[in-house]
Image (cartoon, rainbow, N blue to C red):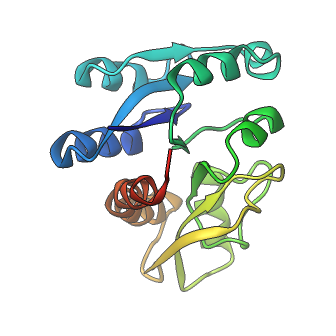
Amino acid sequence: MKKTILFASGSGSNAAQIIQYAQQKNTYTVAAIFTNNPNAGVIEKAKNYGVPTVIFTREELNNGLVLQKINEISPSLIVLAGFLWKFPSDIIATYPQKVINIHPALLPNYGGKGMYGIHVHRAVLENKEAESGITIHYVNDNYDEGNVILQKSVNVQECETPEDVAAKVLTLEHKHLPMVVEELLIKTTT
């Protein structure tokens, strides 16, 4: 069965959706969750689903130790599901076209360094956008600039707070990310 690794920094709601989907469909498995945050909610979610976690520091991410641990698992896909640090070039080079990210906006709008979570939703609201959404894309060496795999939009005109926008966008994330992961894993040869 093909394996994926998830990277997350926060609560892990997308990670939980992917794990549930994988366990229900039985078409792929989540081999591990990697996190840079020893207090992240994703750790407890992983434990509840019996998925091992790897907690690492910035130094370990950049000195090759995380890549070594990834190589031990040999995943067919790496999913950044709410991971807040820039992803290292050595991992991207080792797993070309096998690292994807989900961004809570319609890229290229509201992407780049510092544009994550509530910051994105606040900017969407402040600019009085009629819609927002998600972009699932391949990861390259620049923030939020990899080739787009899927975009889905939602009307946010009636949203009054960034949290309102976030809730609508999160619904799209939970619906589409697990299916995209499955589709990409079905297409991969390794």
- At 30% from the left and 38% from the top, the residue drawn is 19
Quadrant the N terminus occupies: top left
Q: Nearer the viewer, residue 91 or 106?
A: 91
The image position of residue 29, as x and y in percent, is 33, 36
Residue 10's place in the image compared with 48, above or below, is below
From this viewpoint, is residue 2 visible? Answer: yes
Q: Nearer the viewer, residue 183 or 171?
A: 183
In the image, farthest residue toward the left: 24
Residue 45's place in the image compared with 189, above or below, is above
Residue 56's place in the image compared with 166, above or below, is above
- At 52% from the left and 15% from the top, the residue drawn is 54
From this viewpoint, is residue 86 visible? Answer: no
In the image, farthest residue toward the front: 189
The image position of residue 24, as x and y in percent, is 16, 45
The image position of residue 129, as x and y in percent, is 60, 82
Which quadrant holds residue 176?
bottom left
- At 68% from the left and 66% from the top, the residue drawn is 123
Q: Relative to 125, is 93 on the left or the right?
A: right
- At 72% from the left and 73% from the top, the residue drawn is 109
The image position of residue 117, as x and y in percent, is 58, 50
